[in-house]
Amino acid sequence: MTNPVTTIGFDQHDHASCIHSALELAEAHCTNRKLQFTPVRRRVLEILLREHRAIGAYDILELLAADGLGSQPPVAYRALDFLVQNGFAHRIERLNAYTACAHPQDAHVPAFLVCRNCRLVAEAITELEQGRLGTAAAETGFTIERIVVEAEGLCPACAGAET
């Protein structure tokens, strides 16, 4: 049986393979660092990988509750915090939502392109010292530790539907 091709970011890919690879990477990361990859943490990562869009903690909590994995907000938030801290998920500040990391194998600073209509998220890789902000920081002696780059607009599918 072939896996259906669906959208990640704005490109087509083998969705089942994507989920499988990301889960294997997370398991190996946790094993190598002696971290607990609990069933709840695994399930939250599966949900984020399946969605490939920004999803809120309470939406995740509803799915966890349906799976019998907990119904209290700390259950979802603890799992999300773990996934973000270990580079498997990102928080989309503007939407107060989360998305799976599209590049968990790479140390990077993510930049997000967020569709305002369907909430699909494409993740690009940037650098802390890149561009005008990096130049300004260097000129003033400022050390950048964290950057959040989020651009809102329309994905190709939604842009096409509006025309």
Image: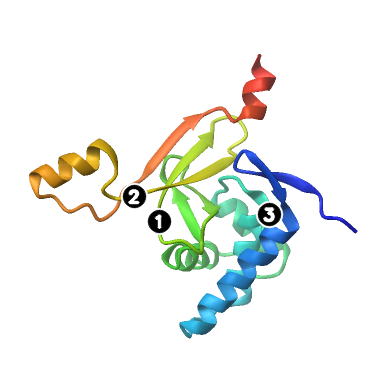
Q: Is residue 8 above or below residue 23?
A: above
Packing grade of label 1 (10 A; few <14, some 14-19, many >=20) is some
Q: Residue at x 19, y 41 (%)?
A: 135
What is the count of numbered marks?
A: 3
Q: In this view, does 152 lie above or below 46?
A: above
Which residue appears farthest toward the left when viewing the image? Answer: 140
- Tell me: 159 left or right of 127: right
Packing grade of label 3 (10 A; few <14, some 14-19, many >=20) is some
> Looking at this view, is 45 or 2 the one in front?
2
Amino acid type at mark 1: His
Which residue appears farthest toward the right when viewing the image? Answer: 1
Q: Which residue is drawn at 47% across and 54% down?
A: 90
Distance from the alpha carbon under mark 3 to that under mark 2: 27 Å
Query: Do callouts 2 and 1 mark residues in contact (Cβ within 8 Å)?
Result: yes
Frontmost of labels 1 and 3 is 1
| Circle 2 residue | 127
> Residue 101: x and y, percent?
52, 56
| Circle 1 residue | 108
| Circle 3 residue | 50
Element type where label 2 sits in the image: loop
